[in-house]
Amino acid sequence: MTSLLSPRPVAVNFHLWPKCNLRCTFCYAGFANARRVLAPEDAERLVRELAAAGTDKITFVGGEPTLHPHLGQLTRVAADLGMTTCIVTNGARLVAVLDAAPGAVHWVGLSVDSGNEQTQAALGRGTGDHVSNSIQIATEIRRRGIRLKLNTVVRDWKTISRSLSHQDGAASRTFGPRAGDPRSKQTGRRND
Ligand code: SF4
């Protein structure tokens, strides 16, 4: 039992699958040093231990987490243990994962950077059909009553930050990598 006074992992990002079906130019999640992934039973044990430690929310990320053959089961375990579950995905096998564990996924973060197919393809996010595919997937997510958020990589954040700083009512005006964030170095591949 976790003490209220002890640190606990309130929200956890579980990078459970290093590979991805896409090749985004900005991706840092190459995981070149990852020699293996956790065996299914170990991944499930980790989810159970996080729940026992008091974790409120678990987000499954990669690479592309929907390529993990047991992601549906992991979301099921997490949801049954009372955690809020989220998958951050480019949409690859999302529908199959949702089918495998109905009701177990509460949030989906869908990665879309532009409404223009050519821009997405130039960024390496798909080959010219990522926008239309994402619209279909978003429609399916909403149909199932799952909360949806968009993950967008902002490349020219200084320009956008300047632009928003002149607008009233902006929800947030904080842009750019946080101090210590490896993305601030812009040296590798980026995951979102
Ligand atoms: S940014 Fe996301 S979708 Fe793109 S290559 Fe990296 S893990 Fe895959």
Image (cartoon, rainbow, N blue to C red):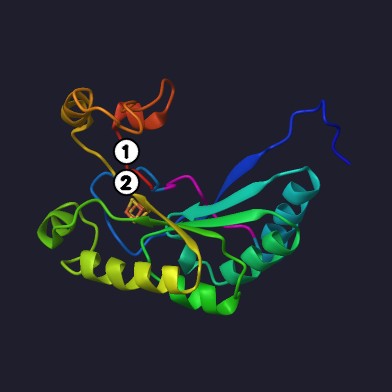
Determine which quarter of the picture holds residue 174: top left
For label 2, being within 8 Å of ligand 1 is answered yes
Determine whether 192 is above or below 71 in the image: above
Label pair 2/1, CB-CB below 8 angstroms: yes
The answer to whether residue 143 is magenta is no
**Of 48 and 40, the residue lying toward us:** 48
Residue 185 on image: x %, y %: 32, 27
Residue 113 on image: x %, y %: 24, 51
What amino acid is found at the position of numbered circle 2 in the picture?
A: Cys
Which residue does the image show at 53% across and 79% down from the upper left?
99
Mark nearest the camera among 2 and 1 is: 2
Dot 2 or dot 1: first in sequence order is 2
Residue 156 on image: x %, y %: 18, 33
Q: Which region is colored magenta? A: 31-38
In terms of secondary structure, where does tag 1 sit?
loop
Determine which quarter of the picture holds residue 155: top left
Q: Say left or right for 22 vs 42.
A: left
Q: Say left or right for 120 vs 78.
A: left
